[in-house]
Amino acid sequence: MNLRRLWAIVIKELRQLRRDRVTLAMIAGIPVMQLVLFGYAINLNLRHLPTAIVDEAQTSASRQLAMDMLATDIIRPAAHATTAEDVMALIHRGEISVGIVIPRDFERRLARGEPVAQVLVDGSDTVVQSAAAQLAQLPLTTPATERDRASIPLPRAPISVVSFYNPQRVSAINIVPGLIGIILTMTMVMFTSVAIVRERERGNMELLIATPVSRSELMLGKVLPYGIIGLVQTTLILLLGMWLFGVPVRGSAIDVYWAALLLILANLSLGLLISTRAQSQFQAMQMTFFVFLPSILLSGFMFPFEGMPLPAKWIAEILPLTHFLRLIRGIMLRGADLHELWPEVLALLAFITLMMTLAISRFSKRLD
Amino acid sequence: MASEEAAVIARGLTKVFGDLVAVNAVDLRIDKRQVYGFLGPNGSGKSTTIRMLCGLLTPSGGNIDVLGMEIPRQAEALRRRIGYMTQHFSLFGDLTVRENLEFLAAVQGLAAAPARRRVAELLEEFHFSGMERQLAATLSGGQKQRLALAGSIVHGPELLFLDEPTSAVDPESRRDFWEKLFELADAGTTILVSSHYMDEAERCHRLAILDRGTLVADGTPAELTGSLEGRTIAVEAQQPRRAKATVLGLPGVISAAQIGNSLRILCESGDGIEERLSRALEEAGLQARLTAARPTLEDVFVAVTTHRAPGETAKTP
């Protein structure tokens, strides 16, 4: 490893990058665009679902239940209905997403511990469905002290969802740390996946391999400049996340950068491996999608890791983004430090070592 | 096996790609401080041979000794001592003239101060003063070749491989380019240059002709043309096209090319061919005057690269 040669390659890459306007625009454009899109537009926690409430009991307790449900802000009254049939028809026509029916024998059911009300949901949207499911778990608010515990058994204890780290259930707080990972995966793999194959397409590779430059100098020289760019992107997302959505950094900022650097290097070395295999820049792009889609879907960014079937979990464990998400959520939202999360650090280090070794060994300084 | 005076010795050099024998048992010897030409039609194995000699391709068979090193085993060590200019422009189009040279100087292992001096020297010597900040992609064909040559000698190599360096360059730039090559050769550099231009071939100290992967001729330009003495005949005729048709049917005629009002005929051997030609033309009722012509390298090229099955008649080159 000759430092002057390594430096020459880094400088060359940066000079080429400076003249590549599309890539330059991507470096800043993708983080800003994604942050705004995911932060504002994609809100996985629905509020103000159009609702109709039918209170057949008309007692003070039933009215209390209806008021409590409205107070959650998940629903808003949108239509008038007097019977359960009305509610069904409204849902069918798409005028409301949720219907609540409190039956005439509400007080008796309450006393017996039977289901006291029915929440009817337009199940065609699973996100709406799960929002309504939360509603159904609303604890009955008759204060426990007012009840005669001996005579009236409580209804089957409804499970209340308590969110410690995001009590207002604001999506942006959960999404922004994950978004650092998504953006770094998208841009970093893309940058290096074309790095080698582009030189081959433009004919520069034959010149390079005829010089004394070594394989590891060439590979590292291509990774380092983009590593710096990845850290710049991380800063950009963090600042925008704090400014636009008030996302907190509860752990140390240094740890956030270490975690980001690990993911950056993991993605760059993966991209480099793709680049040694791809025959053209277009093919390299196609191959990055094979990494990108499972990363978004399986890493725990979109859907909770816990709910996945076992094979999906295995795949997820291979993806660097999965480990990064555990790291970054731990650091930024729970205030954990890197030492506590060492298994994820170790997994990322192993991934980087493996990919870099494969990339260097797969790259040959021969044309055959 | 290496002799003091030989820069390159190859024996039985062979390269097979699948079913195709690209280079077939080629023996080569290139002496130091020579400009050695590599002549051959497209696809004759010139590039493949050059790539094997600089260790970029692994030979399927044969031995290579370059500057006393066994190739491909010592290819990495050889790279510090050779320069290689690829057939297609392979410098970075999105770097400037100066940046390209700076990059190559650093990659070739020159320390910072000597690299700066060397780049300044090359910019001056290759007439790039004033255009050092121009992007390489915007240079003209001749300028690109000049820059590529400057880049390939940035570390002062002992041996230079040039793969068709002038194939896309205007005649004046070609002349300048060759001037540079001779300056380098005078300064002690050994140069292997492939080409399909005859005028360039004639400038080489020695040349080899490759055809379909096989070495078909090897010698100085004078030796090669000398071997064709008596086999080239000029025919001046009233109707050169009819004369050509008549002549091409004769046994022993390899080719006939029309040049203005005369024909240039290349024969297999000089024995009595002149008489047979004039008889044939007379019988066809054509007035013609035959004279012996001085053989050129083009004749050599045609003679060694024309393939005829027995009984087949000659082709028009």
Image (cartoon, coloured by chain):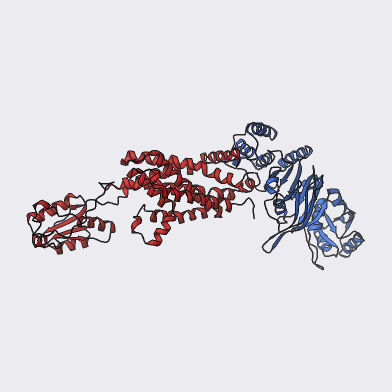
Chain colours: A red, B blue
Q: Is residue B109 above or below residue A67?
A: above
Can you say which quadrant of the picture contains the C terminus of chain B?
bottom right
Depth check: A234 or A147 in front?
A147
Q: Is residue A314 above or below residue B92?
A: below
Report x, y in % for residue A301.
Answer: 36, 52
Q: Residue at x 48, y 46 (%)?
A: A265
The quadrant holding residue B122 is: top right
Report x, y in % for residue A137.
Answer: 20, 56
Whether residue A25 is visible, yes or no, is: no
Report x, y in % for residue A256.
Answer: 40, 42
Relative to B124, A295 lies left or right:
left
Relative to B130, B180 lies left or right:
right
Relative to B139, A123 lies left or right:
left
Whether residue B73 is visible, yes or no, is: yes
Depth check: B289 or A356 in front?
A356
Depth check: A331 or A368 in front?
A331
The quadrant holding residue B185 is: top right
Q: Residue at x 33, y 46 (%)?
A: A39
Residue positioned most to the bottom: B311
The quadrant holding residue B284 is: bottom right
Residue positioned most to the left: A59
Depth check: A335 or B215 in front?
A335
Report x, y in % for residue A272.
Answer: 53, 50
Residue positioned most to the front: A150
The total of numbered circles placed on residues is 0
